[in-house]
Amino acid sequence: MSPSTTVHRFDFLVIGSGIAGLSFALKAADIGTVAILTKKKSADSNTNHAQGGIACVTSSEDSYDYHIRDTLEAGAGLCNEAAVRRIVEEGPPRIRELIELGMTFAERENGHRGELDLGKEGGHSKRRILHAKDVTGREIEKALLGAVAASPNIRVFENHVCVDLITKHRVGYSTANRCLGVYVLDTSTGMVETFAAPVTLLASGGCGKVYLYTTNPDIATGDGVAMAWRAGVPVANMEFIQFHPTALFHKDAKSFLVSEAVRGEGGVLRNRKGEPFMDKVHPLKSLAPRDIVARAIDAEMKRTGAPCVYLDITHKSADWLRERFPSIYEKCLSHGIDMAKAQIPVVPAAHYQCGGVVTDIDGRTSLPGLWAVGEVAHTGLHGANRLASNSLLEALVVAHRAFVAIQKGEPTPPWTNMLPGWEVGSASDPDELVVIYHNWREIRQLMWDYVGIVRTTKRLRRAATRLRNLEAEVQDFYWNHKLTADLIELRNLVLIASLIVDSALSRRESRGLHYTLDFPKPDTDVPPVDTVLHPSL
Ligand code: SIN
């Protein structure tokens, strides 16, 4: 047995480099040293891919109550109303901070210079989405990463893939458990290093890669939820996976997102006969909440046998589209689709994990020393279906609240000095890489086929059985072979898939994003409850 030797000590560990992690890190750096651990490059985050923007009340025609009402309505009875109110009401000062860091949101034109241009998306009754055209996430990342680079207290570790949280119980202490840090694979050396800190913040995003088709980048493999679960922290509402209704349908487009803001500007969904099929489904038509639109598209495709539906925004001119949606316009054009003249072929794709690690409104988990913010966490904001563009708002507000709460109370434990290193053991190099790739593909395909937009108990049970076998195979591989990034991600993905399936099986009703033919209606006999799963250690 040869333990790895490198131990890095910081005051704060931040896992993930999206809006939640970076905005927390910048605040934490005022009072201590911060390590940001990121799997690939710093800008490889879900935030970077966000097109729509940040929902926030800034207009005199809007109000907190309208935003709260829209969020609760989309959440289908499962939002935590107190969390919704706090997050909505605490948004504006966080937006001002972002602007002070250098973020520029789009402004209105023609005599309205100086006023923010507000977009509209599904389920919003008012225009309230602050955006930077269709590259909002990229611009936010640029502003935050610029500030991080200028901070002497922050060190960014790229190509560092977290393996497991280090807890007192894991390393042999029997007194009250707490998080001590994390074991991390440096993919450039192949060594597992120890990162120790009194505060570890999970900001690692979601799990879109558990599905065959997703709008998420490759990093979205559910690592945060999986590590928290293995460390004994409960997770909630994992059955609520949001499918974005409109990913570009093209063999070379890798599920490129066509923002809901396109429908916010009058884009209409049509079937292959040109019929606006959403008109019969919901009063908000093509701008209905996402769960309803994604389900209607799925039904339309199944009914007509078509491989996609179409998004029609041809009533806008090429100049206007190029100005408002530069990235989408270019992407479509690169695949031979001029969206000013032709309808865009679209299909739903996995997009957002509405459940996650159970936290309070300050991002505090049940494991002292461990905090979670953003898509990885479940605060109760999203309920059974996230309102579009509420997630970046949640990340900013809860990251700030976590910082304030930690500053007030988190003690520095002296026993972080006594951490054992990672035991390499006698693990051999993976000789059968095909096992990893095969299992990875199988999980994603079976989640798509059996645990998608429309579910049945029979399909969920079939998925559960297959996943148990896959989990055993992956565990065996994990313990007997040297760690690689792919193996770490596969181990996390198979666990996440099981958590989604187990959560889906335990919800015996349809609600929000969880729709099952066996229980097609919400259960109105009892008040709606979250699905909370507790790990057995
Ligand atoms: C979009 O631009 O449609 C995505 C916005 C979101 O998922 O919040």
Image (cartoon, grey):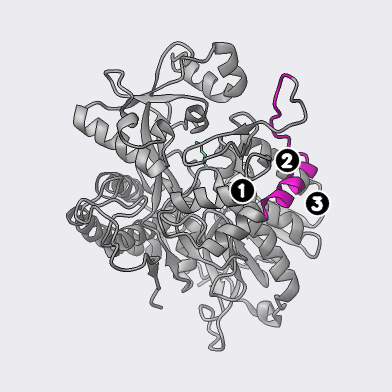
Residue type beneath disc 3: Ser
Q: Quadrant of residue 309?
A: top left
61 or 198: nearer the eye? Answer: 61
* Disc 3 versus disc 2: nearer the observer: 2
**Residue that appears at 59% across and 53% down:** 394
Against 180, residue 383 (above or below) is above
Do residues under tags 1 and 2 come within 8 Å of each other at their CB atoms?
Answer: no
Q: Which mark is residue 18?
A: 1
Residue 213 visible within the image: no
* Disc 3 versus disc 1: nearer the observer: 1
Residue type beneath disc 1: Gly
Q: Check disc 1: other Cα within 10 Å, few if <14, some if 14-19, many if 20+.
A: many
Q: Check disc 2: other Cα within 10 Å, few if <14, some if 14-19, many if 20+.
A: some
- The spot of residue 45 in percent (x, y) is 57, 44
* Nearest to N terminus: mark 1 or mark 2: 1
Q: Which mark is residue 143?
A: 2
Against 80, residue 353 (above or below) is above
- Which residue has dot 3 on it? 151
441 or 513: nearer the eye? Answer: 513
67 or 48: nearer the eye? Answer: 67
* 379 horizontally vs 533: left or right: right
Which range is magenta?
A: 90-110
